Image (cartoon, rainbow, N blue to C red):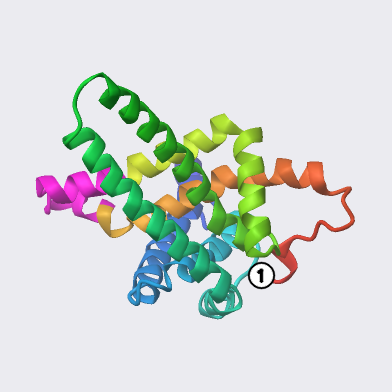
Amino acid sequence: MKERLKDFWGLDSPFLSFMKKIGWVFLLNIMFAITSIPVVTVGASAVAMYTILNKMIAEREFNFLKDYFRAFSENFLKSMLIWLIILVVTIILSINTWYVFGQMSGGFAYVMRIGTVIIAIAFCMLANMVFPLIARFDVNMKETLAIAVQIAISYPLLCLESVGFTVAVLGGSLAILYVGWFGGFFILFPMIAFGLHAFMQSYLFQKIFDEYAEEEESDPDYVTGEENN
């Protein structure tokens, strides 16, 4: 019994290793929130967060602040442009969803609603992928979008799983705040929502990107961003 407890609480135990990762996720959530205050910097903040998570999951050494702001600055421009595109499309889809589900009626409305849901899911699949892609691979904006589409077509079920994570984490956080569960454990969930979402996505995309990299490694023009991050 004592040996089991020792293994459970040991410095190298799976439990403490998991708790350490949760601690980093909490810190990343705070850093992401602070650096995203100007709004236009959300994309660069996301790339920086995924860069740290990639190293953490791969159990590579990293300097939290140095590596975060290095990834933030090196990928600032292309991340900002992609983020602004995502933001504009999100606003358009939100207005369209409100109109289609709230204002339209009749048989054609059902067709529009189905189409809206399909487009929203496809958009979410791509939007979830672009910032992890920039954090993992040394690619420009055009290549990022092209690879995201290619991976979404090649691994639709895994990409749908990423959408499920988004709905569960971010949607769950909004639900908790809306209902008003501001006591006990529940308030912690919204407080780490962005970091937790990125953490879960990183594990999923690591599998997708590893398989994609294996398929592309024979290409002489294929270069990963691991060396730069």
Element type at mark 1: loop
In this view, 5 is above or below 153: below
Q: Which residue appears at 57% of the width and 60% of the height?
A: 56
Left or right side of 174 for 149 = right
Q: Which residue appears at 19% of the width and 26% of the height?
A: 105
Task: Report the front residue among 177 and 23.
Answer: 177
Q: Position of residue 71 (x, y in %)?
A: 58, 73
Q: Which residue appears at 26% of the width and 26% of the height?
A: 109
The overriding secondary structure of the stretch rendered in magenta is helix
The magenta stretch spans which residues?
171-189
* Quarter that holds the C terminus: bottom right
Q: Where on the picture, by quarter, is residue 32? A: bottom left
Was residue 45 drawn as part of the magenta stretch in this picture? no
Q: Position of residue 160 (x, y in %)?
A: 49, 34
Q: Which residue is mark 1?
A: 229
How dense is the environment of label 1, judged by Cα within 10 Å: few (below 14), some, or many (20 and up)?
A: many
Left or right side of 192 for 14 = right
Q: Position of residue 196 (x, y in %)?
A: 40, 52
Task: Tell me the amino acid under the disc marked 1.
Answer: Asn
Kindly tell me whether residue 170 is visible in this rendering. no
Kindly tell me whether residue 128 is visible in this rendering. yes
